[in-house]
């Protein structure tokens, strides 16, 4: 398993279930991954593949009930944070782990000044006084590239554009110098030029501050540009994982291959239609016993319907260290 | 904000003038004569003289304009005269009640404290219970507490106060003898015993009315809280590691209160107008009871003045609600 030494976050066998009236939904099924210091892990998959739920459940942000974390371990700072009481977990959230969410238009509280919203975690976690927190909040706003920070502290969120609000969200997430920043589709709700600015900002901050980042997205182009490693999720499980170059150069899982094909190319011959993956991602009403992708897979054979594939190494390195895939089908090389 | 408030105030003037005209004409069109209280033995020519003395023989528009002048100039200036000992409107005709042959505003001045003590307390109590209940019901949606709250609120809102009032009287006053059934207006609070008596006689009307008020406001609070609890910014607050108390009572409540506060403000004119029935059930000699009495006695000036005061209150509290909205919600700027 992963080299515990330099992993800031180590998730093992995480299982999350939603209890609904229509029965249970197994949203996260035995997800394991780790994050090294200063590393950027990209998490990709379609909507409903369990990316966000995985990240929210490891830090206790899902409403419980209906959600229930049914198993697994999440090691952060020498503790399994799934086993610690809620009050201790609150000390972790916002301090050790920062969150940036998808929609900056709704993620900030509309009735409080931006400065107050940045100061809140500083006062709570760092024990700062209001005056100290205000100074630090202004620094943070400058850090995320908002000019005239001192006076902008007194603005309300509606006085900011979407991109600026996402910068504020990033400032809040970074306020207490977290070890891990979880960015849940931080650019999806923004228009393309603003997306590029935010991505540049995160790249820049990563070099300055050196925290590890989990970047959830369904934009493979973004991942290729910024990630060190990539984790592809489908049906609430990790179907392929590996260093970004290896994974993009030699995708093993039919789903990853299909995802890569859906990215329209700017160069070369223009195809008549954009590629799509036919069908819908599954809703798991029980723990999967077959490969969740089998119904949509072009390479599926009998074994796929009776046995859920385990992750296996592709490049001979220990599982989690190199390139691995959860698929019965062996992709032909070359 | 200030220009907005001023603009709204200016707009309120034509609104109120129109309302006053409608009220005046409607009340005037109603059947009945100011002489209905006068014994039939009084000869017709004397009646005519009496009517003339009251100015009731004048055409309706003349009376309307005179009444306007009295309402907007003479009565306010009379209060000024009383306060500062000046003589601005000395000797000018005030609005006179047909019933008491005294100024309408004297009656109103006597009745308003009764209404404010009983109905005002009920409203205050209602708000103070409703808001916490609404918050907790929303936070623990579908819990037994929420279900019970929903049931009581439905009951409180759908059963009219004249029914719950009589029911309470039957149970607590007649069967159990815990509280008096009639409100004693002349009771003065001077010591602990009279304070206790005052609380006891207020208990039933306050209970009935606050149940009704709390029912409505708790539902508003609950639905507003529910709407906000699901918002993204709540998740952000939790992601920052804020405690549940801060998340719910600061982040969510502050947003949820915006519509609730306006509902509360809009309900305040109802303290004066809507409590008419409860005042009659419990014989509270307040402003509502004065209105009912005036209607029975064909006391046109009293009815017109009281109805118009309710209209003014409604317009004013609408304005206050709008301004509060702007104060509470930074997204709303009126300039």
Image (cartoon, coloured by chain):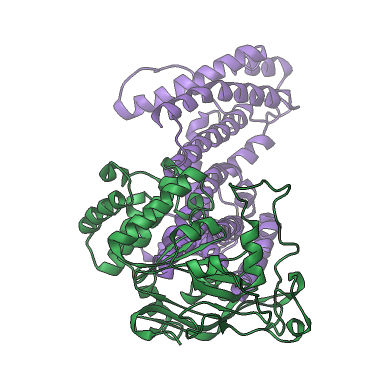
Chain colours: A green, B purple
| Rendered location of residue A286, percent (x, y) | 70, 82
User: Viewed as shown, does residue A254 lie left or right of B270?
Assistant: right
Q: Is residue B128 visible?
A: no
Residues B282 and A133: in front is: A133
Q: Position of residue A232 (x, y in %)?
A: 57, 70
Q: Position of residue B39 (x, y in %)?
A: 70, 29
**Vertical position of residue A195 compared to residue A212: above or below:** above
x and y, in percent, of residue B152 in the image: 65, 66
Residue B296's image quarter?
A: top right
Q: Is residue B256 visible?
A: yes
User: Residue at position x 44%, y 53% from top?
Assistant: A109
Residue nearer the viewer, A228 or B110: A228
Residue A299, above or below A227:
below
Q: Is residue A249 left or right of residue A172?
A: right
B314 or A149: which is nearer to us?
A149
State the residue at coordinates (24%, 68%).
A127
User: Taking B320 as reference, is B240 left or right?
Assistant: left
For the N terminus of chain B, the quadrant is top left
Rendered-image quadrant of the C terminus of chain B: top left
Q: How many marks?
A: 0
Up-down relation of residue B297 to residue A75 (above or below): above
Instruction: Please tell me which residue is depicted at 54% across the width and 66% down the height of the picture.
Output: A249
- Towards the viewer: A322 or B290: A322
Residue at far right of view: A302
């Amino acid at each position: 398993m992963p080299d515990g030494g330099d992993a800031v976050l180590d998730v093992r066998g995480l299982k999350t279930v939603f209890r609904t009236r229509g029965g249970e939904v197994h949203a996260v099924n035995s997800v394991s991954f780790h994050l090294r210091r200063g590393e950027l892990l990209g998490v990709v998959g379609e909507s409903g593949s369990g990316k966000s739920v995985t990240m929210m459940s490891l830090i206790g942000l899902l409403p419980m009930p209906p959600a229930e974390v049914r198993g697994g371990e999440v090691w952060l700072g020498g503790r399994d944070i799934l086993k610690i009481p809620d009050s201790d977990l609150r000390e972790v959230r916002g301090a050790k782990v920062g969150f940036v969410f998808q929609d900056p238009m709704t993620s900030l509280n509309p009735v409080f000044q931006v400065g107050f919203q940045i100061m809140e975690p500083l006062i709570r976690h760092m024990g700062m006084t209001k005056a100290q927190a205000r100074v630090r909040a202004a620094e943070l706003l400058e850090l995320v590239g908002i000019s005239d920070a001192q006076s902008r502290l007194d603005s309300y969120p509606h006085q900011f554009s979407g991109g600026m609000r996402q910068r504020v969200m990033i400032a809040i997430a970074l306020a207490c110098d977290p070890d891990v920043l979880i960015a849940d589709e931080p650019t999806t709700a923004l228009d393309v030029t603003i997306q590029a600015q935010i991505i540049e900002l995160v790249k820049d901050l990563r070099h300055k501050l050196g925290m590890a980042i989990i970047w959830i997205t369904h934009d493979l182009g973004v991942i290729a540009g910024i990630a060190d490693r990539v984790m592809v999720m489908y049906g609430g499980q990790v179907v392929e994982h590996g260093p970004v170059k290896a994974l993009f150069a030699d995708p093993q899982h039919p789903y990853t291959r299909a995802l890569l094909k859906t990215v329209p190319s700017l160069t070369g011959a223009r195809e008549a239609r954009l590629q799509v993956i036919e069908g819908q991602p599954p809703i798991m009403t029980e723990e999967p016993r077959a490969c969740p992708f089998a119904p949509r897979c072009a390479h599926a054979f009998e074994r796929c319907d009776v046995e859920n594939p385990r992750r296996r190494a592709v490049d001979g390195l220990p599982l989690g260290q190199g390139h691995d895939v959860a698929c019965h089908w062996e992709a032909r090389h070359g | 904000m200030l220009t907005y408030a001023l603009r709204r105030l200016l707009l309120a003037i034509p609104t109120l003038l129109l309302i006053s005209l409608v009220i005046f004409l409607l009340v005037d069109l109603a059947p009945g004569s100011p002489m209905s209280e006068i014994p039939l033995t009084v000869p017709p020519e004397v009646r005519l003289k009496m009517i003339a003395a009251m100015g009731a023989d004048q055409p309706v528009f003349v009376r309307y304009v005179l009444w306007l002048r009295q309402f907007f100039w003479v009565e306010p200036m009379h209060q000024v005269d009383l306060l500062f000992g000046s003589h601005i409107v000395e000797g000018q005709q005030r609005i006179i009640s047909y019933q008491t042959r005294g100024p309408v505003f004297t009656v109103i001045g006597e009745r308003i404290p009764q209404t404010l003590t009983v109905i005002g307390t009920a409203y205050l109590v209602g708000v103070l219970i409703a808001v916490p209940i609404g918050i907790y019901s929303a936070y623990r949606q579908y819990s037994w507490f929420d279900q019970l709250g929903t049931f009581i609120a439905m009951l409180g809102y759908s059963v009219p106060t004249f029914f719950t009032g009589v029911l309470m009287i039957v149970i607590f006053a007649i069967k159990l003898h815990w509280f008096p059934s009639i409100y004693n207006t002349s009771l003065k609070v001077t010591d602990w015993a009279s304070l206790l008596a005052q609380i006891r006689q207020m208990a039933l009307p306050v209970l009935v009315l606050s149940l009704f008020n709390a029912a409505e406001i708790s539902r508003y609070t609950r639905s507003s809280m529910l709407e906000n609890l699901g918002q993204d910014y709540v998740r952000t607050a939790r992601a920052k590691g804020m405690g549940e108390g801060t998340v719910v009572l600061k982040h969510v409540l502050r947003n949820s209160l915006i519509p609730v506060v306006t509902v509360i403000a809009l309900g305040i004119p109802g303290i004066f107008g809507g409590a008419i029935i409860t005042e009659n059930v419990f014989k509270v000699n307040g402003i509502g009871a004065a209105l009912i009495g005036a209607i029975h006695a064909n006391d046109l000036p009293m009815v017109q003045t009281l109805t118009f005061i309710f209209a003014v209150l409604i317009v004013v509290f609408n304005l206050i609600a709008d301004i509060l909205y702007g104060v509470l919600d930074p997204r709303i700027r009126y300039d």
